[in-house]
Image: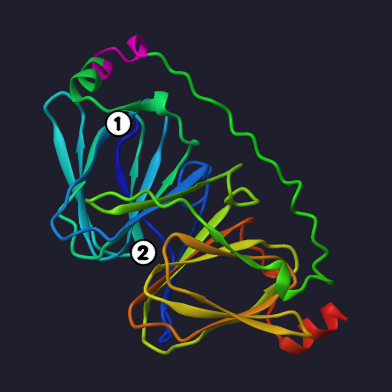
Amino acid sequence: MKQPKILNLPKITDPRGNLSFLEGNKHIPFEIKRAYWIYDVPGGETRGGHAFKEQQEFIVAMSGSFDVVIDTGKGRKRKFSLNRSYFGLYVPPGYWRQMLNFSTNSIALVLASTSFNESDYIRNFDDFRIFSDQPTKIKKDLKPTNTDFSNLDYNSATTSVHDCKVIELDKNHREKGNITVVENGGIIPFDINRVYYLYDVPGGEERGGHAHKELYQILIAAGGSFDVVLDDGKEKRTIHLNRPYQGLKIVPGIWRELKNFSSGSTCLVLASSRYDEKDYIRNYEDFLAFKH
């Protein structure tokens, strides 16, 4: 049986704000099917208290801190303290887990190996103990992911700033902290192949200044606020992001810059493909030539 463990992530340091990133089956041992983040958590709260039959998880404290307690169901517990954005906890299936001791306004990012399926959850601890002794006694009935990419039909040489739009994401309001969930085949128009986030950003800073030939992105202000300046070579448009339940879809062929960060903001980005330097356009003159 796989064991829970801390996994280190790349950390790119920058005086304008640090960046960490991860890709499925590279930095974590599964492909990403679902991502959710927990925010607006009152200090000292406890979240979770369930297990999965099949789902693997990776949990990161993007901001603040909290503990994750893992229980085998056989009287053995282990506590992991998460308080750095550049490492996270891998949780295999078959473990009961709780998240507790949240510092005020923490942001927890959870990446999952399966789409949501209520039949994969074990929400009662007595049922979990039965499952941990004889896992085959609880039926596994996982549904496949159906992904539709029919709306990914943009020509990056001709895209405009008006092809980018703010998407209202689900907001599950809870007294112990709100949750926003996205998953492949759902409201976002691509599979999540890379996740990265900016943190420790000083107030008023600027980041970005590049375009992509093929990459699709969803930008989320998971904490704080910032502006996204979009440029298609002919027209500019500025979008203000300040809600963790809103995401800005950016299509390929758009030059973008991030500006006016509020102090300590966290920018979460969900990306459609793995890192490929050849997909970047980092010089603005090269970008104008690409568009024309």
> In the rendering, which numbered label is found on residue 157?
none
**Residue displayed at 58% across by 44% down:** 186
Q: Can you tell which mark lies on residue 51?
A: 1
Q: Earlier in the sequence, mark 2 or mark 1?
A: 1
Residue located farthest toward the right when viewing the structure as drawn: 292
Vertical order, 50 against 111 (above or below): above
286 part of magenta stretch: no
Residue 12, by quadrant, is bottom left
Against 222, residue 73 (above or below) is above
- The residue labelled by disc 2 is 86
Rendered location of residue 57, percent (x, y): 39, 42
Q: Is residue 99 above or below residue 136?
A: below
Q: Residue at x 43, y 85 (%)?
A: 16
Which sits in the foreground, 276 or 289? 289
At label 2, which amino acid type do we have? Tyr
| Figure quadrant of the C terminus | bottom right
Query: Mostly what secondary structure, the magenta segment?
Result: helix
Provide residue 7's location: percent of width, then percent of height: 36, 52
Q: How is the image coloured?
A: rainbow
Q: Quadrant of residue 104?
A: bottom left
Amino acid carrying mark 1 in the image: Ala
Q: Of 218 and 176, which appears nearest the observer?
A: 176
Q: Which residues are magenta?
A: 131-138
168 lies left or right of 214? left
